[in-house]
Image (spheres, rainbow, N blue to C red):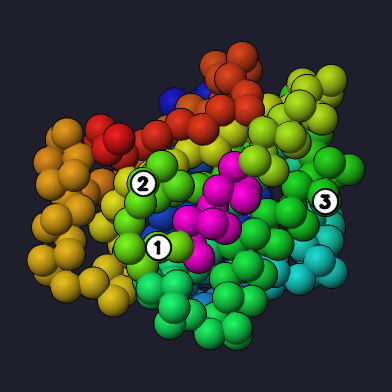
Amino acid sequence: MNSLQGKVAIVTGSARGIGAEIAITLAKAGAKVIINFIHDQIAAEAVCTSIAALGGEAHAVQADVARAAEVSKLFDAAIARFEHIDILINNAGILLFKEIADISDDELERIIDINFKSVFYTLREGAAKLSDNGRVVTISSTVTRLMLPKYGAYAATKAAIEQLTRVFACEMGKRGITANCILPGPVDTELFRTGKTPGDIERMANMAALGRIGTVRDVAQVVCFLASDEARWVTGQMIGVNGGIN
């Protein structure tokens, strides 16, 4: 229960959904957590309140992680509050569910900024500001292994951060820092349901060997393991958390 005691974690995009559940799960394991948000301060503060009610400690920091200067501000705020950073969870992201032919230039730029550049900026910042023997877990997606219509741009940004993570793991290994991606399958969140019909969701659930879409808890528990010392020999890996979608 206290596998992360004394650790400090940043979870990007953690005001709601998978990010909020990850933050709460890390706090239950003993970590102090920075809750990152861009717009919804009320939701971010609610996550902090939930963690405090569990006996944990959390602090909300507003930062647009698609902007390099704001990422630097986020890391500096974490260090100012908790003195060091041991765990970085790259969770912030958006979904674009559209055929390639219909994607506008602005939509493409936005998904690259939020899904790819944000991870690049946090890894670059983390290279200088993460403690030795730190942990990085980045949320990718099982769609990088599939050929699903309307997921082209989204899958491309997620594939890019997978390769970025592999290289980062190699570069940081000398300091004992591990870096891995988890690749969730469909997870029951507001983001996932956007733009999909009940039929779409049922079809995707049936793709899994376990016959359902995932929950935020399914994802958060794997993240918590990878953030712990028990996962110290796991790095540069792309781990499917998808109920058996291949």
Q: Which residues are magenta?
A: 153-162
Q: Which residue is mark 2?
A: 146
- Mark 3 crowdedness (10 Å alpha carbons): few <14, some 14-19, many ≥20: some
Q: Specify the amino acid type for callout 1.
A: Tyr
In reply to whether residue 184 is colored magenta, the answer given is no
Name, please, the residue furthest toward the right: 128
Percent across and percent down for residue 56 are 53, 45
**Contact, CB < 8 Å: mark 2 with mark 1?**
yes
Which mark is on residue 139? none
101 and 111: which one is in front?
Answer: 101
Q: Are marks 3 and 2 in contact (CB under 8 Å)?
A: no
Name the residue: 74% across, 34% down. Answer: 167
Q: Which residue is mark 1?
A: 151
Which quadrant of the figure has residue 172?
Answer: top right
Main SS, magenta residues: helix
Q: Are marks 1 and 3 in contact (CB under 8 Å)?
A: no
Of residues 153 and 118, the one nearer the viewer is: 153
Secondary structure type for disc 1: loop
